[in-house]
């Protein structure tokens, strides 16, 4: 889980509660970064469980990803290229989280985007989640694969890899990742029970329109379907 003894992240966002009983990563998997007000970036180091990261173990980078400060032997995650692309293309993004949540990653391994409109909160807050093309980890293939989706989406599935969430702060990015995983598990249960039913189109738009009322930050793709003919994800009455 993304639980750590780190006291704060960029402005006092507590990390102790991260996880909430939902497993998002195992062993040393996953990476987290935050963009500071001056443009510098704090990132988790590679090869270390998120449970063991303390403030002095975070790596400080410039906007191009060059290391400014790091404890001896520590370096940023090799996936930092993906984080930098998010910051470069979205001025509103101040935090990026990459994880391997098992339910959502199951969709990525099955090569299915999460385009269900079956849960009220996820329809409003996240919207349809695309499946980005396969990219070799640690290379520019991954940032190149996600870039076409960044303009409209705050959450993405990485084909055969995991998930990515961005936010206006680290807590928002984390909540999106956590919500993605819960949504995936709920949908899998619905499929086991016979199929997932979408909310009606009129009610979908009403939920999207509520984003302003609830002051939801970030982007929403509007109504979009990637798997419209999947009879289990879009059960017909």
Image (cartoon, rainbow, N blue to C red):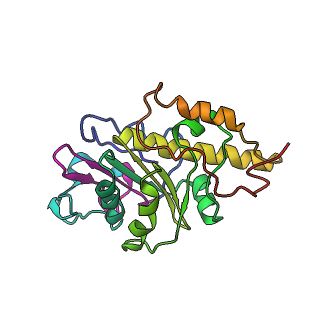
Instruction: Tell me where residue 141 sits by quadrant.
Output: bottom left
Give the left or right position of residue 118, taking residue 3 as reference: right
Q: Position of residue 40 (x, y in %)?
A: 18, 52
Q: Is residue 58 visible?
A: no
How many discs mark residues in the rendered view?
Answer: 0
Chief secondary structure of the magenta portion: loop
At 69% across and 46% down in the image, what residue appears? Answer: 187
Q: Position of residue 27 (x, y in %)?
A: 45, 59
Instruction: Tell me where residue 5 sits by quadrant.
Output: top left
- Residue 58 versus residue 12 in the image, above or below: below
Give the left or right position of residue 130, taking residue 169 as reference: right
- Residue 176 versus residue 143 in the image, above or below: above
Write the start and end of the magenta stretch as one range. Answer: 27-51
Let me know if residue 144 is in the magenta part.
no
At 27% across and 38% down in the image, what residue appears? Answer: 8
Q: Is residue 14 visible?
A: yes
Report the residue that reaches farthest toward the right.
237
Q: Position of residue 41 (x, y in %)?
A: 23, 52
- Residue 90 versus residue 143 in the image, above or below: above
At 77% across and 49% down in the image, what residue appears? Answer: 191
């Amino acid at each position: 889980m993304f639980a750590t003894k780190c006291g704060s992240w960029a402005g006092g966002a507590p990390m102790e509660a991260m996880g909430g009983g939902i497993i998002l990563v195992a062993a040393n998997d996953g990476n987290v970064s935050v963009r500071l007000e001056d443009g510098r970036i704090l990132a988790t180091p590679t090869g270390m469980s998120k449970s063991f990261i303390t403030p002095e173990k975070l790596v400080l980078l410039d906007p191009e990803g060059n290391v400014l400060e790091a404890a001896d032997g520590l370096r940023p995650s090799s996936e930092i290229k993906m984080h930098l692309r998010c910051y470069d293309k979205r001025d509103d993004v101040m935090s990026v989280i990459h994880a391997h949540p098992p339910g959502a990653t199951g969709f990525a391994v099955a090569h299915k985007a999460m385009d269900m409109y079956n849960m009220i909160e996820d329809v409003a807050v996240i919207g349809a989640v695309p499946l980005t093309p396969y990219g070799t980890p640690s290379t520019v293939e991954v940032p190149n694969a996600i870039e076409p989706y960044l303009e409209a989406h705050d959450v993405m599935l990485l084909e055969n890899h995991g998930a990515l969430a961005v936010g206006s702060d680290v807590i928002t990015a984390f909540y999106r990742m956590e919500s993605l995983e819960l949504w995936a598990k709920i949908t899998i249960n619905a499929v086991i029970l016979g199929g997932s039913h979408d909310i009606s189109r009129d009610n979908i738009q009403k939920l999207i329109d509520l984003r302003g009322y609830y002051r939801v930050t970030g982007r929403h793709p509007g109504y979009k379907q990637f798997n419209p003919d999947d009879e289990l994800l879009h059960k017909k009455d």
